[in-house]
Amino acid sequence: MTRYEKLTHYIENVIEGMDFKTMYQYIFDNMLYDLEHSTTDEELDELYNEYFEQDEIQEVHKEPSA
């Protein structure tokens, strides 16, 4: 078994054993750590503005609810 196969098999099994709350917390913690340690303030501003600008564009294009 290759290293990649061992890693993916391990990861898949850990994920299968998680409930939604645990999985959410794990993803949140990993994203927060990654962004805090590998993103400059300028990159973070760009990510933030791009993400929320897309959200705002989608909201504008939604049809009004009746």
Image (cartoon, rainbow, N blue to C red):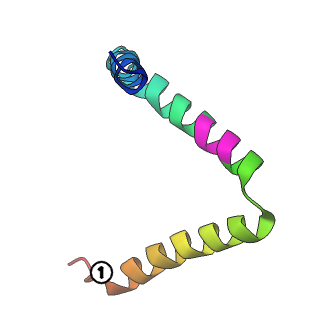
Of residues 63 and 2, the one nearer the viewer is 2
Regarding mark 1 in the picture, which secondary structure is present there?
loop
Q: Quadrant of residue 16?
A: top left
Residue 66 x, y percent position in the rendering: 20, 78
- Going by the numbered disc 1, the residue's amino acid type is Lys
Q: Residue at position x 45%, y 28% from top?
A: 23
Between residues 10 and 33, which one lies in front from this camera angle? 10
**Residue 64: within the magenta?**
no
Report which quarter residue 2 is drawn in.
top left
- Badge 1, how many Cα within 10 Å: few under 14, some, many 20+? few
| Residue at x 43%, y 83% (from the top left corner) | 57
Most foreground residue, 14 or 1: 1
Q: Is residue 49 left or right of residue 6?
A: right
Q: What residue sits 61% from the left and 75% below the top?
A: 49
Q: Quadrant of the N terminus?
A: top left
Residue 56 on image: x %, y %: 47, 79
- Which residues are drawn in magenta? 30-34
The residue most toward the front is 2
| Residue drawn at x 39%, y 85% as measured from the top left | 60
Q: Residue at the far left: name it.
A: 66
Q: Please, what is the dominant secondary structure of the magenta stretch? A: helix
Q: Count of labels shown?
A: 1
Coordinates of residue 62 in the picture (x, y in percent): 29, 80
| Label 1 sits on residue | 62
Does 49 sit above or below residue 19?
below
Vertical order, 46 against 33 (above or below):
below
Q: Position of residue 51 (x, y in %)?
A: 52, 69
* In this view, 59 is above or below 7: below
